[in-house]
Image: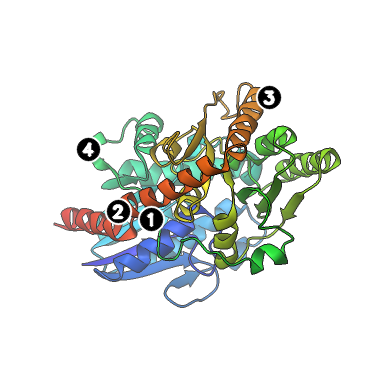
């Protein structure tokens, strides 16, 4: 069995959950079958990388993506199956299927119809192209892997022409040997975080999807005895950057102990922060599963998360954390953002007031991560799907 994974992200260029998924899935698949990876960017070990055509340097980034997809498809000969991840690579997988006559598997990490704010990031024309790539790949794929049951339902809603029998739920996973409690404190000290006081932690990108503006609103009501630590990557569009900075300034004027780490930290430092967090916050308004929940749970952090998408399939309310209900409008925004922020703050404060309970939840979260979300089991199910399609 020879499979080729098509992906935008691959180490060392990993910035989102889909990239994390591909990194660990590829490692496990390579132990079971012959595997090759095609990715975007500069040359690197373990993958063949492609850059957009130079003639498109001033064109839309979505159009540049299509040039990489063409190169990926041309280089996918000899495979028994091609497996694409995210809209960036979906068209490449579809073209490889047509060109080489092999089955195409798509993993649905997110869906463009459910992320209308992508038009702000890519521009209206770019969003039309990203939607075209995803729709073409998913509707014609021999199999669609949904990373949660909620994502399976979303695929059926967004793309009703897809035969439900072609959709298979295979969860994201977590390496619980790598993500495990770390008692050391050097990274905390480097970033000015005290291990002696409660820590409320956010780790994620500055994007509407991750709901950071709602957490910053909630933070105004979070117990001032806790440190608020935001480990946030670069914003994906100007409007969310402006909204975030305004809220950070307002929060700092309201209270102390706001630590903003404007960088994607090395994995070891993130693990240490997670390990010392009293409460880990996931205020996402769209999250098909949310690997970050698993990372926090594996490090024994209690999680407070919005009850959207696949999060309730990971975070067990009242056992490994607390879920915050939220009603979303047609554009994917909270219908009552003030209520959502107040409810989120209340759940965080509930655990800050009972650190023993938070500790029990963290321990239960690790047990759940170990028992239910191993990458080995996920790779086994993926290989079984490949073999079934390849005949």
User: Distance of mark 4 from mark 1, alpha carbons?
Assistant: 19 Å
Residue 34 figure quarter = bottom left
Q: Can see residue 355?
A: yes
Note whether 71 is above or below 360 in the view shown. below
User: Distance of mark 1 from mark 3, alpha carbons?
Assistant: 39 Å
Give coordinates of residue 216: x percent, y percent: 71, 38
The mark found on residue 165 in the picture is 4
> N-terminal of the two: label 2 or label 3?
2
Q: Which of 107 and 293 lies nearest the eye of the viewer?
A: 293
> N-terminal of the two: label 4 or label 3?
4
> Which of the two marks, 2 or 4, is nearer to us in this view?
4
Q: To which residue does mark 1 refer?
A: 84
User: Distance of mark 2 from mark 4, alpha carbons?
Assistant: 15 Å
> N-terminal of the two: label 2 or label 4?
2
Q: To which residue does mark 3 refer?
A: 338
Residue 47 figure quarter = bottom left
Label 2 sits on a secondary structure element that is: strand
Note whether 162 is above or below 192 in the view shown. above
> Label 2 crowding class (10 Å Cα cut-off): few <14, some 14-19, many 20+?
many
User: Distance of mark 1 from mark 2, alpha carbons?
Assistant: 8 Å
Give coordinates of residue 145: x percent, y percent: 32, 47
The mark found on residue 104 in the picture is 2
Q: Which of 184 and 144 lies nearest the eye of the viewer?
A: 184
Label 4 sits on a secondary structure element that is: helix
Residue 348 figure quarter = top right
> Label 3 crowding class (10 Å Cα cut-off): few <14, some 14-19, many 20+?
few
> N-terminal of the two: label 1 or label 2?
1
Whether the residues at callouts 1 and 2 have beta carbons within 8 Å, the answer is yes
> Which of the two marks, 4 or 3, is nearer to us in this view?
3
């Amino acid at each position: 069995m020879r499979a080729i994974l098509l992906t935008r992200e691959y180490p060392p260029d990993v910035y989102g959950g889909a990239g994390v998924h591909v990194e660990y899935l590829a490692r496990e698949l390579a132990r079971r079958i012959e595997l090759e990876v095609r990715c975007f960017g500069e040359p690197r070990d373990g993958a063949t990388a492609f850059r957009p055509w130079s003639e498109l340097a001033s064109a839309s980034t979505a159009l540049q993506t299509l040039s990489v997809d063409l190169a990926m498809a041309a280089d996918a000969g000899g495979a028994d199956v091609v497996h694409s991840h995210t809209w960036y690579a979906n068209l490449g997988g579809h073209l490889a299927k047509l060109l080489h006559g092999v089955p195409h598997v798509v993993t649905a990490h997110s869906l463009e119809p459910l992320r209308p704010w992508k038009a702000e990031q890519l521009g209206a024309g770019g969003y039309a192209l990203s939607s075209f790539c995803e729709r073409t790949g998913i509707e014609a794929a021999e199999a669609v892997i949904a990373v949660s049951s909620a994502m399976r339902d979303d695929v059926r809603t967004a793309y009703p022409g897809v035969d439900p029998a072609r959709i298979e739920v295979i969860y994201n996973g977590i390496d619980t040997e790598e993500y495990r409690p770390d008692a050391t404190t050097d990274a905390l000290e480097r970033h000015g975080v005290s291990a002696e006081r409660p820590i409320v932690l956010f780790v994620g990108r500055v994007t509407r999807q991750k709901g950071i503006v709602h957490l910053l609103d909630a933070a105004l009501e979070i117990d001032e005895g806790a440190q608020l630590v935001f480990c946030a990557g670069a914003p994906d569009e100007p409007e969310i950057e402006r909204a975030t900075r305004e809220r950070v300034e307002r929060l700092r004027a309201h209270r102390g102990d706001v630590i903003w780490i404007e960088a994607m930290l090395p994995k070891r430092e993130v693990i240490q922060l997670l390990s010392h967090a009293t409460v880990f916050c996931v205020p996402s308004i769209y999250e098909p599963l949310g690997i970050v929940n698993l990372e926090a749970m594996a490090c024994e952090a209690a999680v407070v998360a919005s009850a959207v998408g696949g999060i309730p399939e990971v975070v067990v309310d009242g056992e490994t954390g607390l879920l915050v209900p939220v009603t979303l409008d047609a554009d994917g925004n909270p219908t009552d953002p003030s209520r959502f922020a107040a409810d989120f703050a209340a759940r965080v404060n509930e655990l800050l007031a009972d650190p023993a309970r938070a500790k029990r939840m963290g321990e239960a979260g690790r047990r759940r991560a170990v028992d239910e979300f191993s990458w080995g089991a996920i790779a086994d199910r993926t290989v079984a799907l490949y073999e079934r399609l390849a005949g």
